[in-house]
Image (cartoon, helix red, strand yellow):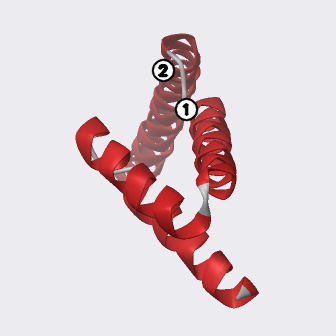
Amino acid sequence: MLLLHYLIKTLILIFVMYLEAKETARLYKLLSDKLGSDTTEAMFKYIDNKTERSVEAAIKTLATKDDLAKVKYDLSKEIGNSVKWMFIFWIGQVGATLAIILLFLKK
């Protein structure tokens, strides 16, 4: 009986999230006829609380516009820094190449 009760609770948890209000009312009536109104009410409260907690947990992990703006700013700052060092490296390479060419031309 306990396993059946757990199975019913699990199935309700899966399906209630996708049911419309009319279907939910029909499901409530069917379950209250089978399990009693107290048990059915407790199951629906459990499902509502579980759903609210999972939505709240999902909302906490979402990035806000401020978070995205900060990441964009940090990324643009790093890209600018990388471009600066690439130009410094390229100027050094050009200088070294010119020095080697001038050494060969003097001989």
Q: In the rendered view, would you say 66 is above or below 41?
A: above
Q: Is residue 66 visible?
A: yes
Quarter of the figure with residue 2: bottom right
Q: Which residue is mark 2?
A: 72
Residue extending farthest to the right is 2
Quarter of the figure with residue 20: top left
Q: Position of residue 35 (x, y in %)?
A: 59, 66
Q: Which residue is mark 1?
A: 62
Q: Helix, strand, or loop for circle 1? A: loop
Amino acid marked by disc 2: Lys
Residue at position x 55%, y 10% from top?
66
Residue at position x 61%, y 36% from top?
52
Closer-to-camera residue (40/93): 40
Looking at the rendered image, the quarter that the N terminus falls into is bottom right
Local packing at callout 2 (Cα closer than 10 Å; few below 14, some 14-19, many 20+) is: few
Residue at position x 52%, y 57% from top?
32
Local packing at callout 1 (Cα closer than 10 Å; few below 14, some 14-19, many 20+) is: few
Q: Position of residue 58 (x, y in %)?
A: 58, 40
Q: Position of residue 3 (x, y in %)?
A: 69, 88
Amino acid marked by disc 1: Leu
In the rendered structure, the answer to whether residue 25 lies left or right of residue 14 reads left
Residue at position x 50%, y 21% from top?
68
The Cα atoms of the two marked residues, 1 and 2, are separated by: 16 Å
Q: In the rendered view, would you say 19 is above or below 36?
A: above
Closer-to-camera residue (105/46): 46
Residue mark closest to the camera, 1 vs 2: 1
Q: Position of residue 26 (x, y in %)?
A: 31, 51
Q: Is residue 107 visible?
A: no
Q: Helix, strand, or loop for circle 2? A: helix
Looking at the rendered image, the quarter that the C terminus falls into is bottom left
Closer-to-camera residue (73/17): 17
Quarter of the figure with residue 78: top right
